[in-house]
Image (tube, rainbow, N blue to C red):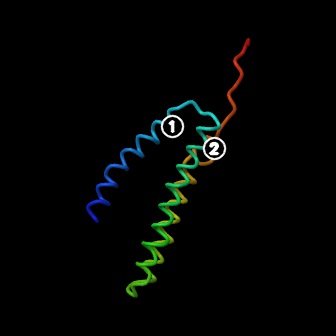
Amino acid sequence: QMLIANMFFCVTSPFGLGMGMGISELEQTLTIAVISGTLQGIACGTFLYVTFFEVLPHEMNNGENRLLKLLFIILGFTAVCGVLYIDPETRKPHCYQMPQPIPGS
């Protein structure tokens, strides 16, 4: 069963990557923005679920170095927030924009 799960992941990961790249190259319409946002939300939700319901509880239930683990969780969160704050694209996200009219039409 573990082998089947690994094979499934090996097949679907490149497929999802290609699908995301293909969607990002399409002309930006409202439909494409909704599809892209939905797929990004599913991916983000998966990472959040695995982090907060699978990894962190397992690590924090282990009684060794709990305070040190908490410190590094906070430091990691702070580092990610810092990088996002420094990145100029974060302050000006690329959102859906209505197509501009062609001059002279």
In this rendered view, identify the residue nearer to me: 3 or 64.
3
Residue 25 versus residue 5 in the image, above or below: above
**Residue 65, quarter of picture:** bottom left
Residue 96 versus residue 102 in the image, above or below: below
Query: Where, quadrant-wise, is the C terminus in this rendering?
Result: top right
Query: Where, quadrant-wise, is the N terminus in this rendering?
Result: bottom left
Q: Where is residue 72 shown, x and y percent of the image?
A: 45, 73
Alpha carbons under labels 1 and 2: distance apart? 18 Å
**Residue 14, quarter of picture:** top left
Q: Where is residue 31 shown, x and y percent of the image?
A: 62, 38
- Residue at the image position 52 percent from the left and 57 percent from the top: 44
- Residue at the image position 40 percent from the left and 88 percent from the top: 63
**Going from the N terminus, do you reach mark 1 or mark 2 first?**
1
Circle 2 residues within 10 Å: few <14, some 14–19, many ≥20:
few
| Count of number-bearing discs | 2
Q: Which residue is identified by label 2?
A: 92
**Labelled disc at residue 24:** 1
- Residue at the image position 46 percent from the left and 78 percent from the top: 57
In this rendering, position of residue 55 left or right of residue 29: left
